[in-house]
Image: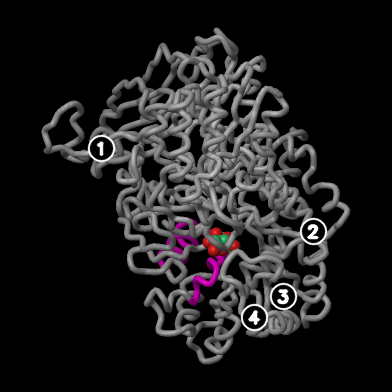
Amino acid sequence: MTKQLGILLMLLLFFVGAFSQQKTIDQRVDSLLALMTIEEKVGQMNQYTSFWTVTGPAPAEGRQKKQYEQLRQGLIGSMLNVIGTENVRKVQEIAVNETRLGIPLIFGFDIIHGYKTLAPIPLAESCSWDLDLIEQSARMAATEASAAGINWTFAPMMDISRDARWGRVMEGAGEDPYYTAIVSLARIKGFQTQSLAANNTIAACAKHFAAYGFAEAGKEYNTVNIDPYTLHNVVFPPFEMAVKEGNVRTVMNSFNSLNGVPATGSHYLQREILKGKWNFDGFIVSDWGSVKQMVAHGYAEDDKQAVKIAATTGSDMDMESEGYVTYLADLVRKGEVSESVINDAARRILTVKFELGLMDDPFKYCDPTREEKLLYHKEHKKLAHEIAKKSIVLLKNERNLLPISSKQKKIAVIGDLAADDNSPLGSWRIGSDDHSAVPVLEGIKAYTKNYTYERGVALKNGKTDFLHHVKLNNTDTTGIGKALRLAKSSELVIVVVGEHGFMSGEGRARTDIGIPHLQLDMLKQIYEANSNVVLVLMNGRPLDLSWAEEHIPAILECWHLGTASGNAIADVLFGDYNPSGKLTMSFPRSVGQLPIYYNHYNTGKPFIPNTDIVFHSHYADQANTPLYPFGFGLSYTTYEYSDFQVALRDANKVKVSFEIKNTGKKAGEEVAQVYIRDIAASLVRPVQELKRFKKVALEAGASQKIEFTLTEKDLGFYNSKGLFVFEKGSFDIMIGANARDVQTKRITIK
Ligand code: GLC
């Protein structure tokens, strides 16, 4: 009896302690708010960029002087893009020592896939289907960023997009809401862990809320009009999981208008859904200048009205529009904005600062010895290498051209990107150093000396940077002659082509998603000269690879793989690592098919294959299917799925089991996927929905039994009012290696 009593007492003390700790933060926020003027509360809601680098339109000339004055007046609550502990300390010292209340700033940064040591771009990393590794990747990023003085990242981006024309598909986790939700949760855990107070953890930011990825025609910042049904079933799930299971401490709203209302001024999104239905208790930051952009949207007469709308509808912090700091205090004094609005926003922001431990030790992230020790740490480079290997997707491997034997003689390596130590870093590398990636050539050198390199045609003209478009070379074919002669005289040709690192990302929507013209021309001519071609692709979005798929015997999708790029690519080329990546976005046959995605509705006149009848859902001039489906990826071995069973269990549960066998000669890892289809419901349901997956490592000849139980939570859906419903009836359960190659069994729940 005493033992149980002891445990009960311990539990009681624990909860009282935790509650009193939280009560302490609430109390401390209350006491601080009681001391603050209206201007100082508004100051917490104001975020400026530094002058060390900008990720948006550069601040107006001469603003620096005003910025430091406002800093000393306590009119800035946060800064972004401040690089290094020395600079962070410099600014923090002003905030802490020269303002009336000494409230420290919170320093934000776009740590999208690493700080100094870069992991693969998020879309590539999502193709690893390795949640533990993805969490470790975020942990590594947080460790380096926090060592550099940063305590808040504007990540993970969790925008669902089905359109490869949109440049920011590189930043998310692909087209599926379930998979994007669990990948984003892993990233949030990696950034925040369970203890935000530790000096190696940082606040995460679920972005962009909401539906930015549905920009019409994939055009950057473009209009979004989607129905509530799609919002609740496709767009919201990752954000809801981030709030409810990830305890994400911040959310960033988005530039786009959604159904006629700019997200930054959306009461529905910010107060009704996020802070209301989901009870989000962190704070919302606007996107760069999106408060004032409501004037351009035609949603506000002027900046002052934009400020009023944004603040009252729940946008707690104003990134870089200078709107709050200019108008909000006045609006409150005139009674046009209730003081409760700024009290709530300031409370949310101060609470996160307390949770981070900044209020007790504003310089806890400013230890130069940690910075020196942890940035580019060798363990981080090893991890980046591990993730990069697992993010590579083998799309084709005829005649087993891959892996390349280390005895292979007369290898030609051709392509500008093969020597490029910058593109693999992708476009979101502002914390890292340009030209810090391992190029493919260096990776190959570690495996063989039997290669000769020729650049072939140049990918671009002139220098490139974060703020400006890459100037593609579309005219100069210098170098192609030498490349062709080399190809002709070689036994095997590795061609490295694709996109420069700054051809995808924010502001980089494209109407042409093919391999850039001269590179494709060169590839075709090389293939004519020698058909033993291994194509290595570097890109930040699904490309139109239809010509390559038809002709080239071996194709590796290598994305922009970050710091360890060349080493990871070489490991796969020479077979040290058996590729295990699988696509998380469908690859179209042509840009005309976009948007294309696996979890589409069936329509009333579904596609009829092998007919020239016109009256069914299809294109007259293009196949209906993607070139490579969601979940697709090959291996240097083969796998067999067998003994597939489904069985009803009590409480509307469905037990799914099957066996996977490695039927090849090499060990490998396979991502087995489970999909469902609700055959008939009160609203049409997708022809497939991913509901489970498991990545299994199998030695040659080995097999493993896989079992899952699906519940109402998996089989149900949100109706147009946002209510979750489960409806009995028939369901197809599918298992397989990707969305196309599946085995199906039907089950009926009565
Ligand atoms: C950018 C992006 C956003 C980023 C912010 C700060 O415009 O839209 O994702 O976090 O500005 O750099």
- Mark 1 element type: loop
- Percent x, y for residue 242? 54, 50
Structural distance between the alpha carbons of marks 1 and 3:
66 Å
Indicate yes or no: mark 1 CB to ligand 1 under 8 Å: no
Whether tag 1 and tag 4 are in contact, CB under 8 A, the answer is: no
Q: Earlier in the sequence, mark 3 or mark 4?
A: 3
Q: Name the residue located 44 percent from the left edge and 16 percent from the top edge.
A: 658
For mark 1, what is the residue?
622
Over which residues does the magenta segment extend?
Answer: 268-292
Structural distance between the alpha carbons of marks 2 and 4:
30 Å
Horizontal arrangement in the rendering, residue 589 relative to residue 172 (left or right): left
Q: Name the residue located 51 percent from the left edge and 16 percent from the top edge.
A: 400
Neighbour tally class for label 1: few under 14, some 14-19, many 20 plus, Cα within 10 Å? few
Structural distance between the alpha carbons of marks 3 and 4:
38 Å
The disc at residue 61 is: 4
Q: Is residue 384 above or below residue 642?
A: below
Q: Earlier in the sequence, mark 1 or mark 4?
A: 4
